[in-house]
Amino acid sequence: MIKYDHIMIRFGELSTKGKNRKDFVRVLYTNIKSALKDWPSLTFDMRYDHIYVSLNEIPYEPVLERLKDVSGIYSLSLVYRCQKDIDLIIESALMLMKEEVGNTFKVKTKRSDKTFPLVSDDITRIVAGHILRNTPSIKVDVHNPEILLSIELRQEAAYIFTHTYLGAGGYPLGVGGKSMHLLSGGIDSPVAAYLMMKRGVSIECIHFASPPYTQMGVIYKLEDLLKKLNRYQPRIRLHIVPFTKIQEAIYDHAPESYCITLMRRMMFRLADALAKKRNCPVISTGESIGQVASQTLQSMHVINAVTNTPIIRPLATTDKVEIIKLSNKIGTYDISIRPYEDCCTIFTPKSPKTMPHLDDVETLEKQFDFDSLIKEALANIEVKIVNGEEEEVLL
């Protein structure tokens, strides 16, 4: 039985990044080593357009699964490495084929090392012929094979494989800067956080808590969501902002229909202040156009007016079915639907304003001293660091 000894990692989109490519690959290499830190005996070999992980007797399954979550990886292949000798190549290829199940196959050869004496077509023909002579029950199908046997001849060695797996794609975490992400605990915001990470943006999260109206169960729910997202970003900072006094002031001084708009404006003021403090050049949210009253274009315009910081909404044009599908994919859906209400759902009015006017909202805000309430909230933020199965509270 042949034993896979390497995993080949391909970069994908990084090959298009021009002058930034070197920095992107360096960050990806660091992220890969960090993701695989649980297996210290693994070794790494970085090449121009791929990285090899030498398994060194480590079972490949958990390593492969971990790598599938690393953004910036286009694809992964379990490979058998051998010397660039045609006899070794054909025997290794035959051993791999005998472990596969299927009636048809195709050999595909890529010869990056142009000094090898045989061209790609010759290698393909020789290997396929050897397999046919020694495996009578199998046939060649170049159009729709059940088994695709790939051979890559590179400068350092020959690599043979039959399985390639898609990676997360996108860019390496960290190359896109950092965002202050609004995390409610619902279905949408964790998915939006994942999409930000996939584009190389690391996140810090801000959550607005309104005890005694909201329960501690919401915070536990957030921690569990972030543990799922730790697959894509190993360490996430969560800022829990006390929001009760601000909400009570809004509901004491404004018509019920405007309360959601005013509440969202206060949230964005708080997120903006924290983003500046934490050197986050953007704010991100899980909003989707038209999904709720505060997410109409007019509402977004009025809410955005409180900040000059760019607001990124990865789910802006995504429908709910697609969002739920992504939520299930990343493992957050079952946590998101736990029955704990957040500050938005508890104070939802019967008929929220869907087309608020900026002048009206600014007039309503003059009815109470929100500046002092915001300063008080910022001074009493609780910070948690969620890192896999661990949490660290920073007072």
Image (cartoon, rainbow, N blue to C red):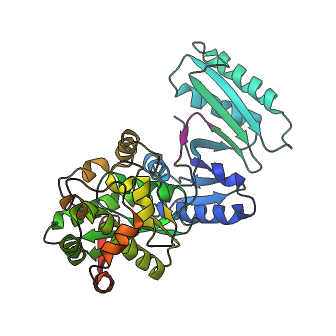
Q: Is residue 127 left or right of residue 350?
A: right
Measured from the top left, where is residue 300 in percent x and y? 42, 59
Q: Magenta residues?
A: 161-171
Q: What residue is shown at x 81% (from left), y 27% (from top)?
A: 122
Observer able to see residue 205: no
Q: Residue 256: x, y in percent?
A: 21, 63
Front residue of this view, candidates 206 and 395? 206
Q: Position of residue 18 (x, y in %)?
A: 75, 59
Judging depth in this view, the residue of 364 and 321 nearest the camera is 364
Position of 322 with respect to 155 (left or right) is left
Task: Say if 183 sits above or below 60 in the image.
Answer: below
Where residue 114 appears, as percent x and y from the top left, is 85, 43
Provide the major secondary structure of the magenta segment: loop
Could you tell whether 146 is left or right of 343 in the image? right
Is 105 positioned to the left or the right of 392 in the image? Answer: right
Give the quarter of the image for residue 380. Answer: bottom left
Magenta-span inclusion, residue 108: no
Screen quadrant of the C terminus? bottom left
Q: What residue appears at the point 32 percent right and 53 percent down from the top-left corner?
A: 293
Image vertical order of residue 384 relative to residue 294, above or below: below
Task: Give the camera-side residue of 64 and 299.
Answer: 299
In the image, residue 169 lies in the stretch drawn in magenta: yes
Give the residue drawn at x 27%, y 52%: 336
Whether residue 7 is visible: yes
